[in-house]
Amino acid sequence: MPGDKAGKPHSMAPVVHIIAPDDRPSLRAAVEEGGAELGPLAQADAVVVFRTSPGDLPELPDSVRWVQLPSAGVESWFAAGTIDHDRRWTSAGGVYARPVAEHCLALMMAGDREFGVFAQARSWDEDGRNRTRVLERLTVAIVGAGGIGRALIEMLQPFRVEILAVTRRGREVEGADRSFSAGQLDQVGPLAHHVVVAAPATNGTRHLVGAGELAAMRDDVWITNVARGSLIDTDALVQALRDGTVLGAGLDVTDPEPLPDGHPLWDFDNVIITPHIANPESVEEPLLAERVTENVRRFVAGEDLLAPIDPDAGY
């Protein structure tokens, strides 16, 4: 087929190029199912990125009008100076919400039932068997009501908990009993048995939960972080755990990460640490493929894309 001046085939369908360390048939199928054509980077109108770090991203030609990134958190792409105003960028926000929310719920229930303590026991503690609590009817504060937060709210419905949603501006969140702004976090602390951190990592959210916020919390609060380690002041959390002013923590993310051997957090039996595995590899590519299909369809149709990144907001 004859090409145009740029060497791009004449076609009504836009060309999408996949940047990945190896061939990904499911992503290729997702692009075609969305109504676009696969093609080389030099001819691409859009790019889909998978398992490629910002430093490995090649220079994009001016023809690329949209880039689909593979992760919900995009702070590393901002830190690398990759995201600009020259084209549209979308994250995988919401793509992995359900598996991450499921992991979060598991950490919350493990805290209530003190699995961290009992899993390490080497003898039967008759006196300690009834210290646990149930999730039913507790108060849960969810800091960040994006995809993960909304998925968790849905999963918590059968437990009849009171849900306090904390968002940047305090907007109303479907399924939440009350909504607060990030500036009101110290008002939420005294109310919640569980504080779940699921907000995006930006310059403005670093140490969102610090010494002051921890001091305002109930002494029977269980803190769960499935977002980014930087949202919690690790030193302040360690001190609160030492002082016994919080019940414990479930951390799928830490700061620093990976958490080094010998770090004080490893020493607490009321801290459950998982190595950033809330989104299993087994579902990562299939879920992203679904998003790729939908966003390619929207791109072809000229519609708004899902999970657009705001270069000024940082997420």
Image (cartoon, grey):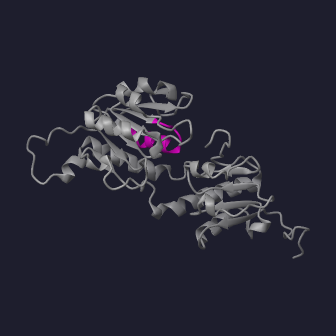
Q: Eyeballing the image, is 185 above or below 239?
A: above
User: What is the quadrant of residue 239 in the picture?
Assistant: top left
Q: Eyeballing the image, is 230 above or below 80?
A: above
Kindly give the residue lying farthest to the front in the view shown. 262
At horizontal 43% and vertical 34% (from top left) the residue drawn is 209
Q: Closest to the observer: 298 or 193? A: 193
Per the picture, the main secondary structure of the magenta-coloured stretch is: helix
Kindly give the residue lying farthest to the right in the view shown. 5
User: What is the quadrant of residue 154 in the picture?
Assistant: top left
Q: Is residue 161 visible?
A: yes
Q: Is residue 175 left or right of residue 139?
A: right
Any magenta on residue 159? no
Residue 125 position within the rendered picture, expressed as x and y whole percent measured from the top left: 10, 46
At horizontal 38% and vertical 27% (from top left) the residue drawn is 189
Which region of the structure is painted magenta?
A: 143-158
Which quarter of the rendering shows the N terminus? bottom right
Q: Closest to the observer: 245 or 226? A: 245
Residue 132 position within the rendered picture, expressed as x and y whole percent measured from the top left: 21, 39
Q: How many marks?
A: 0
Q: Eyeballing the image, is 243 above or below 62?
A: above
Q: Closest to the observer: 73 or 209? A: 209
Residue 140 position within the rendered picture, expressed as x and y whole percent measured from the top left: 38, 34
Residue 116 position within the rendered picture, expressed as x and y whole percent measured from the top left: 25, 48
Any magenta on residue 149? yes
Kindly give the residue lying farthest to the bottom in the view shown. 1
Which quarter of the rendering shows the C terminus? top right
Q: Is residue 136 visible?
A: no
